[in-house]
């Protein structure tokens, strides 16, 4: 009579054959082959309990059904529209008030750039303003006594206004040597540290507002009628919460070929459409994280029409 060890060898040999064939998952083929062989052994020997063989066969059938009906979803990834904060003029970073990962609010100080040149320009314009003020006061006094002309007074007024405007410009340039948070969010990346030179309009750091996070994925043309702007989709990722969802806000109007970064289950040359959605819980996701998107069952738009 065959022992339990012999039965185990039957299962292992079946698993090895499944692995070599690579026609189905290893354990699925192993269970199917084992169930078939065990039923044949029962028929010849009559010693194997009928309940054991039936149980193995039922388990293999259940696993096959689960494998066939599993929805693979659509592959995508997480992106975000960053807010880049940069100085108007080139300079050296003298102070960083934040670090990567810090939460900031609107108006929080972020960094400071050296302002020696801007300070010198401000002092020069203030001196010019003082001279223009004296010239205006003298021209106004002469005009009152009748000794001066209206032309001299008008020229003095014009020079005074130009000097005031230049002082205001210099003060604005001085104020912009310090960077403040334009939006609330998380410091995503710092590009220049203290002591480094930053060019004009080059970002010193980037901020990621929670509302700017988005999901990008592609769907084939056959699935496009099932989607509409405002629809909710389910999100899956490694070790993520089971209740993650997102709302579609963008559907591409033209098709494109499957990007090489998407490992589609269909043919690579199949045309797909870009879909973008806003997650309901952006704090549960990270930029660059791969995700799976599952469509909620619904009546296609074409059928509704």
Image (tube, rainbow, N blue to C red):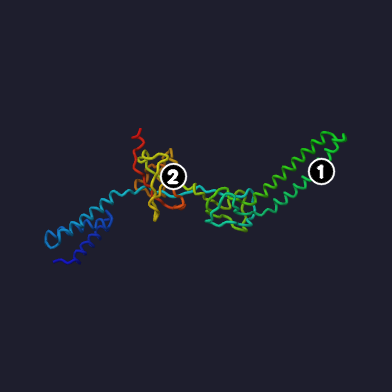
**x and y percentages locating residue 203 in the rendered image:** 58, 51
Q: Which mark is residue 212?
A: none
Give above or below for 85 relative to 251: below
Residue pointed to by mark 1: 134
Alpha-carbon neighbours of circle 1 within 10 Å: few (<14), some, or many (≥20)?
Answer: few
Callout 2 crowding tier (Cα within 10 Å): few <14, some 14–19, many ≥20: many
Q: Is residue 52 left or right of residue 77?
A: left
Q: Which residue is drawn at 74% across and 43% down?
A: 164
Q: Is mark 2 on a helix, strand or loop?
A: strand
Position in image of residue 47 (x %, y %): 12, 63
Q: In which quarter of the image is the N terminus?
A: bottom left
Quarter of the figure with residue 12: bottom left
Is residue 126 shown left or right of residue 235?
A: right
In-front residue for pair 282/274: 282
Of the pair 95 and 255, the residue shown nearer to us: 95
**CB within 8 Å, label 2 to label 1:** no
Q: Which of 204 and 296 is in front in this view?
A: 296
Residue 81 x, y percent position in the rendering: 50, 47
Which circle marks residue 277 in the picture?
2
Quarter of the figure with the C terminus: top left
Q: Where is residue 37 in the image (x, y as percent from the top left)?
A: 17, 59
Q: Which residue lies furthest to the top in this view?
A: 305
Mark 2–mark 1 Cα distance, whole angstroms, equals: 63 Å
The number of callouts visible is: 2
Which residue is depicted at the point 75% across and 49% down? 124
Q: Nearer the viewer, residue 117 or 156?
A: 156
Q: Which of marks 2 and 1 is nearer the N terminus?
A: 1
At mark 1, the secondary structure is helix
């Amino acid at each position: 009579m065959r022992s339990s060890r012999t039965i185990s060898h039957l299962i292992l040999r079946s698993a090895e054959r499944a692995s070599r064939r690579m026609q189905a998952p290893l354990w699925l083929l192993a269970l199917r082959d084992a169930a078939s062989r065990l039923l044949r052994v029962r028929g010849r020997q009559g010693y194997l309990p009928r309940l054991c063989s039936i149980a193995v066969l039922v388990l293999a059938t259940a696993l096959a059904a689960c494998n066939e009906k599993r929805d693979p979803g659509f592959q995508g990834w997480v992106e975000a529209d960053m807010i880049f904060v940069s100085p108007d003029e080139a300079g050296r970073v003298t102070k960083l008030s934040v670090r990567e990962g810090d939460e900031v609010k609107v108006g929080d100080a972020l960094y400071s750039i050296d302002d020696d040149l801007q300070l010198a320009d401000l002092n020069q314009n203030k001196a010019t303003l003082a001279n223009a003020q004296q010239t205006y006061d003298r021209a106004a006094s002469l005009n009152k006594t009748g000794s001066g002309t209206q032309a001299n007074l008008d020229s003095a007024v014009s020079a005074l206004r130009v000097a005031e405007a230049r002082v205001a410009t210099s003060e604005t340039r001085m104020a912009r040597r310090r960077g403040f948070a334009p939006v609330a969010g998380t410091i995503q990346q710092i590009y220049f540290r203290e002591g480094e030179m930053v060019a004009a309009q080059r970002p010193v750091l980037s901020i990621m507002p929670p509302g700017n996070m988005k999901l990008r994925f592609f769907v084939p043309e056959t699935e496009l009628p099932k989607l509409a702007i405002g629809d909710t989709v389910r999100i899956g990722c490694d070790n993520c919460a089971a209740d993650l969802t997102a709302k579609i806000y963008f559907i591409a109007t033209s098709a494109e070929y499957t990007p090489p970064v998407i490992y589609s289950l269909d043919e690579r040359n199949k045309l797909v459409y870009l879909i973008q959605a806003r997650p309901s819980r952006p704090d549960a996701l990270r930029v660059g994280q791969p995700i799976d998107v599952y469509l909620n069952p619904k009546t296609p738009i074409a059928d509704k029409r």
